[in-house]
Image (cartoon, grey):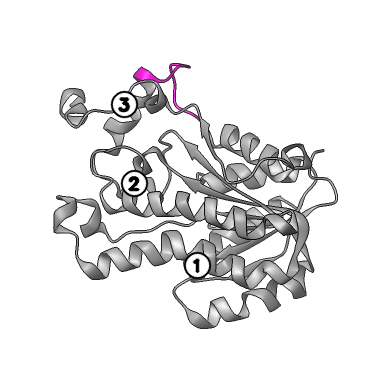
Amino acid sequence: MLLEGKKGLIIGLANKHSIAYGIAKKAHEHGAKLGFTYLNDAVKKRVEPIAKSFGSDITIPLDVTNPEDMENLKSRVEESLGNIDFLVHSIAFAPKDALSGKTIETKREDFLVAMEVSVYSLIGITQRLLPILNRDGSIVTLTYYGAEKFVPKYNVMGIAKSALESAVRYLAVDLGDRGIRVNGISAGPIKTLAASGIGDFRNLLKWNERHSPLGRNVTIDEVGGSAVYLLSDLAKGVTGEIHYVDSGYNIIGMPKEATEKLQ
């Protein structure tokens, strides 16, 4: 029960296939009291039953591009949870046009959307929740190997994830005097709703499975276990780090022609 007595907010859970679901499941199993956000009414219908399955009736509207939602976030969380001990940031988005073709073709407006939702949201949410985030708390966000190396069809999201990983390091320094830790988890490819927007994603899954040290792809439960460690007091001395969960890319990088070979 590594999180017994702790309270946290899960941001970005969309359905039972989300990495955020795997994290919430493990956090609940380890005794945490959880609150959840949802993007819109359609997502709310999926999130509410999930929250109840984890013993929670706390669901809060949050569209990070909506100034009203962002301004009301602190009061809504404080009213329902009080002070919190941890925050899980599991939000990323880029318009479909920015995930096809070539990076050189990226439109300015698509780039700005990707950066606002995938990167600035971590900073903006942390700004607003900092007054109710307990000392020695923990923040975990989710990244991907496309932040470091070329991954076919990842395009502008790779750039956004690079910025997100940099934000992790800078926020870790900013919040260090409060004992608040900021870390990222980089998992291998996982079949989620967000991943479905990446072209040739099935080929990415096949490539990683063939070259992973474990000979398979990682699961959301396994990512959840790593997150629980980072959210718990076991990791009180760990901050500003990116943690990899069986990403085969660390052993064998994916070459540009990989998708063609796997077809």
Residue 227 is situated, as x and y percent measured from the top left of the image, at 63, 41
On the image, numbered disc 2 is attached to which residue?
196
Q: Which residues are magenta?
A: 210-218
Q: Secondary structure at mark 1?
A: loop
- Upstream in the sequence, badge 1 or badge 3? 1
Between 17 and 244, the residue placed more toward the observer is 244
Asked whether 71 falls inside the magenta stretch, the response is: no
Residue under numbered circle 3 = 253
Nearest to the eye among marks 1 and 3: give it.
Answer: 3
- In the rendered image, the quadrant that contains the N terminus is top right
Which numbered disc covers residue 144? none
Residue under the image location 43 percent in, 33 percent down: 188
Give the answer, above or below, for where 67 lies relative to 117. below
Residue shown at 31% from the left, 32% from the top: 204
Q: Position of residue 64 (x, y in %)?
A: 48, 70
User: Which residue carries the number 1 mark?
Assistant: 39
Q: Nearer the viewer, residue 240 or 192?
A: 240
